[in-house]
Image (tube, helix red, strand yellow):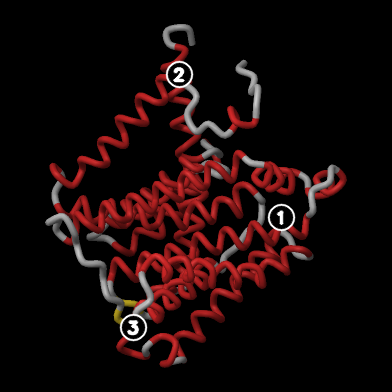
Amino acid sequence: MDLVESYEEELQLIRKPWTRVWVTLFLLFLIGLPWYAPEHITYVTTVIFIYAVGVQGQNLLIGYTGQISFGQAGFLAIGAFTFGHLSRVGVPWPAALFCAGLSAGLFGLVVGFPSLRLKGPYLAIATMGFGIAVYQVFVNSELLSGGRMGLSVQKLAPILGLSSVVFNYYFNFMIALLFTLLSYNIVSSYMGRAFIAIRDNDIAAEVLGVNLTRYKLLSFAISSFYTGVQGGLIGLFMGHLEPNMFTFMEAITLFVAVIIGGLASVEGSIMGAAFVILAPQVFSGYRELVPVVYGATILLVLIFEPLGLYGRWFKMRLYFRNWPFR
């Protein structure tokens, strides 16, 4: 068993030589994808990148801190419409995207206060009520959501002679990569260890000096920030926003991605995002079966592979690493 000698070594994202090889090959594969894959595949992969940001935030809250939230659709809507309004008045997209995450994060702080008193299903119901309330506010407020016509968002103009689809692919790929590195940094730091301690036993964590109030609220704020940025990216990618894009089913989609991808796993968050985007594509002719597929897959995961898709991937890596001595 390898011993970590320093905090700097703990923060290293890749420690094994072979891991560096396959990660490099995978990144090269993603970089070259738009040049040999059909345009539809490039488009779908772009959506996966966008959802990977929000799912990572949800996993920081559920998987690492153990706080169940069904209010992510509300944070998505807040981030998306914040970005939409700011972009319409001429705010540069980096500032608008940051403000989208910041506004959702501030609401996350407010919604996080019930987590200081509530746990499990009670907290889930409280956050679900927030998400539904936000949806109703946007549906009934023409000033906030643009009414029936929705809100138009100006897309980024492609550069370097790239087509719109390819440009959006690389733009969202870089954003997803940035947030993935940020997630690794968070979970490897003292903050991430405090989140895990709260998840495992909050009373013991408090005895050891972890400030429950600070880190529970911080977990909600960071998770909401990720989700708000995802909402802004959706607006920037689609060029149009309306409240019906952020119904309760969006919260369920993010929750399903976390469970199926793998709790407390950054890689699992990306796998879960890929699953919830690809499943509707596979069953495009039978849309009514998609919720059934989600439900059946969750049951299979909980029964046979509690660590999700990442758990299965991790076991496969161990198998080939130890082969033929297994």
- Identified at 62% across, 47% down, the residue is 64
Query: Which residue position is annotated with label 2?
Result: 319
- Identified at 60% across, 73% down, the residue is 107
Secondary structure beneath label 3 = strand
Task: Pinpoint residue 55: horizontal percent, then vertical percent.
Answer: 47, 54
Residue 231, picture quadrant = bottom left
Q: Is residue 19 left or right of residue 126?
A: left
Q: Which mark is residue 294?
A: none
Q: Is residue 218 left or right of residue 225?
A: right
* Distance (Cα) linking label 1 and label 2: 37 Å
Secondary structure beneath label 2 = helix
Query: Which residue position is annotated with label 3?
Result: 151
Q: Earlier in the sequence, mark 1 or mark 3?
A: 3
Q: Earlier in the sequence, mark 1 or mark 2?
A: 1
Q: Are marks 1 and 2 in contact (CB under 8 Å)?
A: no
**In this orientation, does residue 40 appear?**
yes
Label 1 sits on what residue type?
A: Tyr
Label 3 sits on what residue type?
A: Leu
Instruction: Pick the residue in front: 122 or 291.
Output: 122
Query: Which residue position is annotated with label 1?
Result: 215
Task: Pinpoint residue 247: horizontal percent, then vertical percent.
Answer: 45, 74
Secondary structure beneath label 1 = helix
* Distance (Cα) linking label 1 and label 3: 35 Å
Q: Are marks 2 and 3 in contact (CB under 8 Å)?
A: no
- Identified at 83% across, 46% down, the residue is 209
Label 2 sits on what residue type?
A: Tyr
Which quadrant: the N terminus? Answer: top right
User: Dot 3 surroundings within 10 Å: few (below 14), some, or many (20 or more)?
Assistant: many
